[in-house]
Image: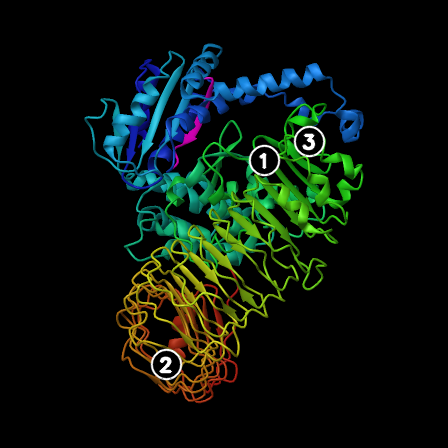
Amino acid sequence: MEEHKQEMLQLLRNGSNSPVILAGVEMGTASWMARQIIECATSTSTDGFCSESLWVSLTKNYDIKWLYKAIYDQLSSDSIPEEWEYEDNNSQLDKTAQDLTVNTVDWEQEENQNAEQEAEDETADNLKVKIQAQLEKRKPVLLVLDCEGNNMHNNEFKEIVLPALSSISHRHLKVIITRCETGGADVIQEQTELGVMLPEESSSLLEKSVGKKIHEIHDFKRLSDAIANERSMRAPAAITVVVGALNYIAQNHNYEALTLKSAILKAAYYEKPLSQAVSPLLYCAYDMMQGDVTKKCFWHSLQFVCNYGGIHYNELITHWIMEGYFDPVDHIEKVYQAGHLVLMELIDRAMLKMQDNNIVVVEGAALDMIDTRPRGFGGTASLGLVRVLKNDEGFGRVTHIDGMIKTLCNPKIVKDVSTLLIDGARLNREVQEEFFSSMSGLKVLGVFNSGYKPLISSFSGLKDLDVLVLRNCDPLEDTTDISNLKTLRVLEISDSRDGDSSLMSMPENLFDEMTQLQSLNLSGLQIESLPSLSKLIELRLLILRRCSRLKKLQSLRGLANLEILDLSGAKSFENFHDTGFSEIPKIQLINLSDTKIRKLPVFGELKDLTRILLRGCQDNLRQLPKLQQLTSLLILDLSGTSQFRNFMFRDSIAELNHLKVLNLSKTKISKLPPIPCNLSELNLSGCSELVELPSVTSLKTLEFLDVSDAPKLAKINHESFQHLTYLRYLNFSNTKVENLPTLSNLRNLRQLLLKNCTLLRNLPAMEGVTRLDELDLSGCSALQVNESIIESFRINMPYPKLNLDQCGSNLAITNSSPS
């Protein structure tokens, strides 16, 4: 790798104006090398030959104008007067909106002319001219065009990307292009194909990157070699990410030495099915994240970068806040600080990368990770902005100041504010009737926890508003005036306080002229029926979480673009008007958890549907309609749907080859249908009628199996589980099993839980089970355990959680302490 780096540096240093290409075998390798080159090329030592670097991640939906604008925006970012961000609050920002908007007619005409001129300049040709002008002012600039997440074909690369870069060629511009796939050496002469690192290189990279605490861990050298050369497959990006996770644990005072040791052991032995396109270490590092909010923010960032490229860190935090990841928003300043802490954690963990110009991108090796959270990204966001925004849209440059997040602009010119997030406490300092009317350029407005009753009527002058969020704003006046905001594409009027919303009805025709609406969130409102949705032909997200008085959903006819339908927590909801989901052919997520749904519409052939969530549908739902045609289904969750008894068709799920998670816990299912072979997680805990566990021989990628608290389970139709080589979690607690299948060679098994298996007399063969973190045999009153077996566990489990309380062998085992 060092040889490749020096080769690239020499090519760039020699002044070639042609782009040079890094093509990596593994995802993330080329972008990792590009960062190494940036570090050397922009060094302040005598070896440096570039004054600065730019990083543009090519999105899946790019066009040439977008590419030029992304480059120009980064080149011109330093021209924004940063002092605006820190201007004395007392001198300007405490003025009321009325004081700040006393402008002359001449000034307004000048501003309108400037805006028109700016719009005219946003053509590809004009952007090229602007880029050239910016480059003339600078010393050499190194541009990295990161194409690793684009997966474009060579023809597209040759016919679109290279000519576009050639058009902005300049003596002060050096260009590196990163790609994932190798090949196409005829594209351009200066191409370097990157394989894997040499064993000594990968070991050296890890050892130089980890902190002192990690070096002090017993047996560090052996474990680090296993991580660097076996688990990472010697891919530098994978090593960098897992090092970030380990260093974060080592530096965080909430973690103990035991946790750090456990994390290193986990990384050293972590395995995933070979069919995965992503390095197993990426999933290992992700598993080490603590906190649901951090994970939500990571997945949002990944989706954003895949669709739109890099994003300024302030804008990214604003996205997180708008999507509700830090709710409730009592004070914008505190929420922004919380978002910044999460940002820094993800950067420290090397899952996000901060470029020199404060643009954030995602580690390229993570771009193809599969999100197996039950709700996924689409089911956790409040607005789905990633789905709605276009390539050239966004919040723009924003800053947090004076209790608000707002457009970074001259504070004297309120008209230039296009994005504003404000909480009720800050809004109370203004003359509310006039505050919003002065901001005629507003496109994005979020108001949180405001008790100002005539709030909606104060928006009447916001004719260009695209995004409006009113979260926990109660009491609200009549919502009729919302209909005047005809340009809205995103609307949220929600209340997170259970049953406390005073808004109980909306006009039937409220949305009739809001035909551009793509995202609608009315969560937590006490409405019994919705306004007509028939005109919302562009609607992509319909979010009605916790609408506890809503009983029925009108026909979805005409909503052909709908992707997310979420009625979770609408505890009175019973049925749909439509008998089938054929009216919404693009649907990706259906969440009816914690509702009273009795009968589901027919699914039919919904090729994009990845998640069906029916958690906690208690005493009503007993069967599912036919599922065979749902070929993209990833998650099926019926946990807590206590009267669900069977699938209507025996082969209902057998051919769902993309299904990863099947959760039937706390249902009344007595017999399972044939299970699809690519399943990763099977949860049957609390299945009170389950008598036997059917064959799981074909489930060679299974990682999680839980049949605990199934009081009738006595039979397991297996002699051996040794084919389940990726199994990490196995739980038979509180069942009537007398014998367990052979567990030999389950080298990835970390938790074996057999609590209160009162009929179990002997442990099965367990040769090769050497990585257990937890073994619970408590309450196994008939179990006889050979002391040599227990001793072998102690040897192979450096920090074991061994529970033998009330075990038939009466052995007293204590955890060994860290050495």
The residue at which mark 3 appears reads as 439
Q: Quadrant of the N terminus?
A: top left
**Other-residue count near label 1 (Cα within 10 Å), few / some / many at <14 / 14–19 / ≥20:** many
Disc 2 + disc 3, Cβ < 8 Å:
no
Q: Is residue 80 magenta?
A: no
What is the chief secondary structure element of the magenta stretch? strand
Q: Nearer the viewer, residue 315 or 744?
A: 315
Question: Disc 3 and disc 1: Cα gap in Å?
Answer: 21 Å
Up-down: is 126 above or below 635?
Answer: above
Q: Which-is-in-front pick, marks 2 and 3?
A: 3
**Tags 3 and 1 touching, CB below 8 Å:** no
Which disc, if any, is residue 314? Answer: 1
Q: Report the residue that reaches farthest toward the left.
A: 186
Range shown magenta: 51-59
- What amino acid is labelled 1 in the image? Asn
Quadrant position of residue 632: bottom left
Left or right: where does residue 777 sit relative to residue 409?
A: left
Residue 581, given in percent of the width and then of the height, sits at 41, 62
**For the point 32% across and 68% down, which residue is it?**
746
Rendered position, 324 above or below 815: above
Residue 639 percent location from the top left of the image: 48, 72
Q: CA distance from mark 2 to mark 1?
A: 56 Å
Q: Is residue 218 visible?
A: no
Q: Earlier in the sequence, mark 3 or mark 1?
A: 1
